[in-house]
Image (cartoon, rainbow, N blue to C red):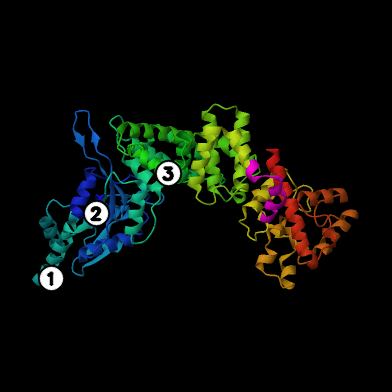
Amino acid sequence: MPIQKYSVNQRSVDMLLHYIKDGEIVIPEIQRPFVWKSVKVRDLMDSLYKGFPIGYIITWKNPNIRLKNGELSSGKQVLIDGQQRITALMAAVLGKEIVDENYRKKRIIVSFHPLEEKFEILTPIIRKSDEWISDISEFLTANSQMSFLREYFAKNENMDDKTKSLIEQSLEKLAAIKTKDIGIIELDAGLDIEDVTEIFVRINSAGVPLEQADFAMSKIASYQPVFDPLFGVNLRKCIDYFAHLAKEPHFVEEIEKNDGEFKQTEYLQKITWLKNIHDDLYQPDYRDILRVSFIKEFDRGKTSDLVKLLSGQNFETREFDEEIQEKSFLKLKAGVLDFVNENHFKKFLLIVKSTGIINSRLINSQNVLNFAYALYLKLRKEKMENNLIEKYTRKWIILSILTERYSSSPESAMDRDIKDINKKGIEQVIKEIEEANLSETYWNIGLVQDLRKATMSNPFLRLFFAAQVYFNDKALFSETITVRELIEVKGDIHHIFPKKYLQRAGLGRSDYNQIANFTYLQQEVNVKIGDKAPKEYFNEVREKVKNGNLSYGLISSEEKLMENLKENAIPDDIFSMDISDYETFLEKRRKLMAKKIEALYKSL
């Protein structure tokens, strides 16, 4: 008979909060900010008051650890689902501060009207009313609830005996909230991460999957080694704070003001440099930081393996090994510190931008950047020459986009790639991928086919624009304004065969939004083009250039006009094209765009 790897128990609210206070159940300090609206805290207390169920919480037991004196220390229970409910209970029942979505500490105060048996979030009006208990935590944590009751009646001395009796009954029910049971599903330490994930998905009533990175973050926050009891908490904060700073640089002020403990650690000074960075090209979240750090340090790509290692699992025996656990945490810390290193991060961004990918508008795959950063850090660790590190990192970025390497099952692909690189070396792996996927057939046929997709999010359209940035191409009909400049100022992408012109001919969205019909163009030039046929407005431009009238743009000669068309992958017979030539135009331009992308890759 299979051994049951979990237990289901009932614990009172009071006992559950006691476990948390004593550290028997560990809530990662900043597992995720408290995102519930205040009214949900109110509704939770109302449900407990009325005896309604509030759902199960799920914990995962850490392995037992042998102490130096030979005794066995029972593993702590790590909270993996139910944080919002537990945090709400701590706020309402114990009066604890919560950390909001902006990582600011604040109180959520629940008030209670005993006569009406009604809960509300504290307001100035409620605070002034003697009929309300403005903060139920003061009642629930009072040394003597009878004394609290006497003080309440003293403020409401005009109440008759019947009213007082009703209020006494209500307050007895309020006090009984602490005795209400909550279901706890305790998962055994021996469960694999895959099993834990499956259990979570099946039990969670909302059906929201908990990512394995969340399990890893819970494991990190609950790690309290003898040599540094705050090791896990501070490493966890470093990861979360860096991710938050990458999106909101000013947040460093909140950390310094609200987290004095973290301020004293080695980590804060290693991440505060982000306050001066305002770049959206690579804004990693906690999952990205874990993934990159893990790949770089462990030569593995599956986050489930990280959870197993942080749990001290020996892959051969499947038993807990404290030495494996400690080594894994130290390696992960080294990986995280490498990730957040100012010099490493900035240099990596420069490498990415040197491919022509200058901002987030030119790449739609975070995992391409994740693996490329892991590769960059790994090659640095191997002390490869800087020029080769830059070369291989650049090539891998573009190669990954071209082969859509991480578009599906990214963790499996990353796991395979890092193991191949570790075994064969980066140069050989790139060579093999080029031979298998980037042959002349691909450049002449495969990539052309990829450019058929009618969507602005097509990675190959973005790669074409990146190629234009790389080669410093000028925007269509301009001798001075570059594609880079239009992208940097969030310039507009326009239709070469104007949208309205194609609509009048009966073509739909999938026709006029073919990516081979897109180009970067100055707004004022686009307005002048209007809805004219290409042969009409291209000839107008050519005539104006010949006559020295630069009203369409700033191109001063026909020779420069033709060079400008070449830079923008416009076929040179565009001067004779109308609606009957639209499909021919698209086919010709796809081939020219593919050649531009090929030139980019082969020049890296």
Find out whether the residues at labels 3 and 1 contact each other: C-beta distance under 8 Å.
no
Q: Residue drawn at (82%, 57%), measured in percent from left and top?
A: 551
Seen as rendered, the residue at the extreme front is 1
Q: Callout 1: 10 Å neighbours few (<14), some, many (20+)?
A: few
Residue that mark 2 sits on: 184
Seen as rendered, the residue at the extreme left is 161
Find out whether the residues at labels 1 and 2 contact each other: C-beta distance under 8 Å.
no
Name the amino acid type tagged 2: Ile
> Along the polypeptide, which appears first: circle 3 or circle 2?
2
Find out whether the residues at labels 3 and 2 contact each other: C-beta distance under 8 Å.
no
Q: Give the range drawn in magenta.
A: 434-449
Q: Residue drawn at (61%, 47%), measured in percent from left and top?
A: 401
Q: Is residue 470 left or right of residue 565?
A: left
Q: Who is closer to the viewer here, 231 or 194? A: 194
Residue that mark 1 sits on: 163
Q: Callout 2: 10 Å neighbours few (<14), some, many (20+)?
A: some
Q: Main secondary structure of the magenta part?
A: helix
Q: In this view, does 281 lie to the left or right of 592?
A: left
CA–CA distance in space, label 1 to label 2 = 38 Å
Secondary element under disc 3, as helix, strand or loop, is helix
- Residue 99, compared with residue 324, is above or below; it is below
Query: Which quarter of the figure has residue 175?
Result: bottom left
Query: Which quarter of the figure has residue 521?
Result: bottom right
Q: Who is closer to the viewer here, 9 or 109? A: 9
Residue that mark 3 sits on: 303
Is residue 442 something one can see in this rendering? yes
Is residue 129 something one can see in this rendering? no
Query: Which quarter of the figure has residue 146?
Result: bottom left
Q: In this view, does 127 lie to the left or right of 305?
A: left
Name the amino acid type tagged 3: Thr
Name the amino acid type tagged 1: Thr
